[in-house]
Amino acid sequence: MDKGFNGLPVVDDKGALQGILCQSDLVAQQRELPLPSFFTVLGGFVALTSLSQLQRAVAKMAATKVEQAMTRNPVTVAPNTPVNALADLMVEKKFHTVPVLENDKLVGIIGKKDILRLLTSTSQEQA
């Protein structure tokens, strides 16, 4: 937070992207446990949410290591991804930080602040 990063990539010993750790992953530890909803059919209970969703939520809340808290297999972009496509992705998926891969190698990470900085500098140049 002190350095202004919203998220950071997580790589293995060979530099391969394993996941991304975002502020939202850490904030998830402070959430209330999302208890599943149920309804009854013929005297039996049927869950409206899956057990796997509940297990993932509990695991994130109890995380003590990066590998437990990070988001695995994050959406990535290539260096030549158009800025408008990246902006659409961030808005639609509510991403704040996206890793940049080239030939399956992490070459950077881009966040909403980077896009805003680019848009601000472009608009100043046009003025």
Image (cartoon, rainbow, N blue to C red):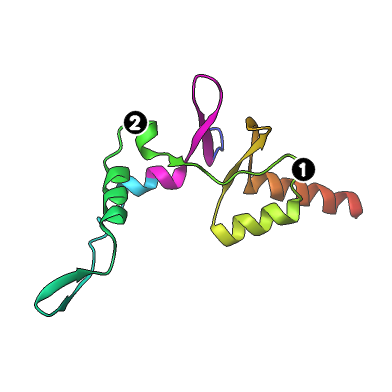
Where is residue 116 drawn, in percent x and y? 70, 50
- Contact (CB < 8 A) between labels 1 and 2? no
Label 2 sits on residue: 65
The verdict on residue 117 being magenta is: no
Q: Is residue 119 above or below residue 109?
A: below
Dot 1: element: loop
Magenta part of the chain: 6-26
Which residue is painted at 63% across and 56% down in the image? 89
Q: Is residue 19 above or below residue 55?
A: above
Q: Is residue 42 above or below residue 61?
A: below
Where is residue 115 drawn, in percent x and y? 70, 48
The verdict on residue 13 being magenta is: yes
Q: Which of 29 and 68 lies nearest the eye of the viewer?
A: 68
Which residue is painted at 30% across and 38% down in the image? 63
Where is residue 62 drawn, in percent x and y? 26, 41
- Near mark 2 (Cα within 10 A), the count class, few <14, some 14-19 or many ≥20, is few
Q: Tell me the CA gap for discs 1 and 2.
A: 33 Å
* Left or right of 104 on screen, residue 123: right
Can residue 1 be seen?
A: no
Which residue is painted at 46% across and 43% down in the image? 23
Dot 2: element: loop
Label 1 sits on residue: 80
Where is residue 81 drawn, in percent x and y? 74, 47
Name the residue at the left extreme: 43
Which three-letter amino acid code belongs to the residue tagged 2?
A: Lys
Q: Quadrant of residue 79?
A: top right
- Near mark 1 (Cα within 10 A), the count class, few <14, some 14-19 or many ≥20, is few
Can residue 108 be seen?
A: yes
Q: Earlier in the sequence, mark 1 or mark 2?
A: 2
Which three-letter amino acid code belongs to the residue tagged 1?
A: Asn
Name the residue at the right extreme: 126
